[in-house]
Amino acid sequence: MKMSSRAKRMNRRHGRNGAGASLSLTSLMDIFTILVFFLLVNSNNNQQPPDNKDIVLPKSTAQEVPKDVLTIQISANDIIVQNYRVAGTQDVLAMEDDIVVAIVDELNARAARSAPVINENGVPEREVMVLADRETPYALIKKIMVSCTQTEYSKISFAVLRKSDEEDEG
C-alpha cells in the first residue's frame, strides 16, 4: 500500500524522536557527591561545648564523649542555663544559703516542658552538664550542684578539655 505524504512525514518525525531520552548521570553524580560532603561537614557534632570566651575549661584525661544535655555555664560574671542568664556569679557567692532559687526555678521550668526521664528505681532523673571556668571557686560550684539536686537534674557532669598525648608525657 502506498503511503501518503502526511504518513511519510509522521514516520520520519517519529523515527527521529523515537530514540528515547537519555539521562546524563554525570550531573546526578556531582549533585550526590556535593550532598554527601555537605552532610559530612554539617553532621551533628556534640563534642564541642558551647562557645563562651569567658570560660576556660580545665584539662583532664577523660575519655567519654559529652552528650547533648542541658548546660549550665559558670563564668566570672554570670551563671547561664542553656544560653539564658539566671544569676550573677558574685551575687550567688554572697548568698548565705547553698540553694540558688533562680537556678532551681529555671531547672524546674525546663523539666516541666519535657517528658520526665525515669531511672531504674522509678525516680525522675535528668542530666545536666556544668561548664565552669578553671578558676571558679569550689563554693560556687557546690551551690550550683546543690541547686541541681533539688530538682530532677540529679545527674551532674562537668565539661573538660581532653589533654593531648604530648601533655601527658611532659
Image (cartoon, helix red, strand yellow):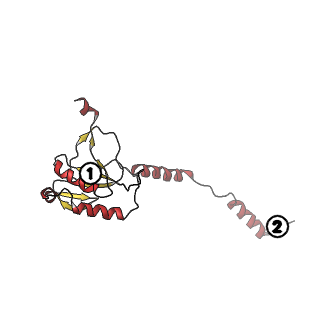
Q: Secondary structure under badge 1?
A: strand
Residue at the right extreme, as displayed? 1
Q: For residue 116, which quarter of the picture?
A: bottom left
Q: Is residue 130 left or right of residue 28?
A: left
Quarter of the image with the N terminus is bottom right
**Residue 138 in view, yes or no:** yes
How dense is the environment of label 2, judged by Cα within 10 Å: few (below 14), some, or many (20 and up)?
Answer: few
- Which residue corresponds to the image point at 24% horizontal and 41% vertical from the top-left? 59
Residue 103 pos. (x, y %): 24, 60
**Residue 136 in view, yes or no:** no
Residue 4 pos. (x, y %): 80, 69
Residue under label 1: 130
Q: Earlier in the sequence, mark 1 or mark 2?
A: 2
- Which residue corresponds to the image point at 33% horizontal and 62% vertical from the top-left? 110
Residue contact between numbered discs 1 and 2, judged by CB atoms under 8 Å: no
- Which residue corresponds to the image point at 24% horizontal and 54% vertical from the top-left? 146
Q: CA distance from mark 1 to mark 2?
A: 88 Å
Amino acid type, residue under disc 1 in the picture: Val
Residue under label 2: 3
- Residue closer to the observer: 101 or 25: 101
Amino acid type, residue under disc 2 in the picture: Met
Picture layout, residue 153 above or below residue 9? above
How dense is the environment of label 1, judged by Cα within 10 Å: few (below 14), some, or many (20 and up)?
Answer: many
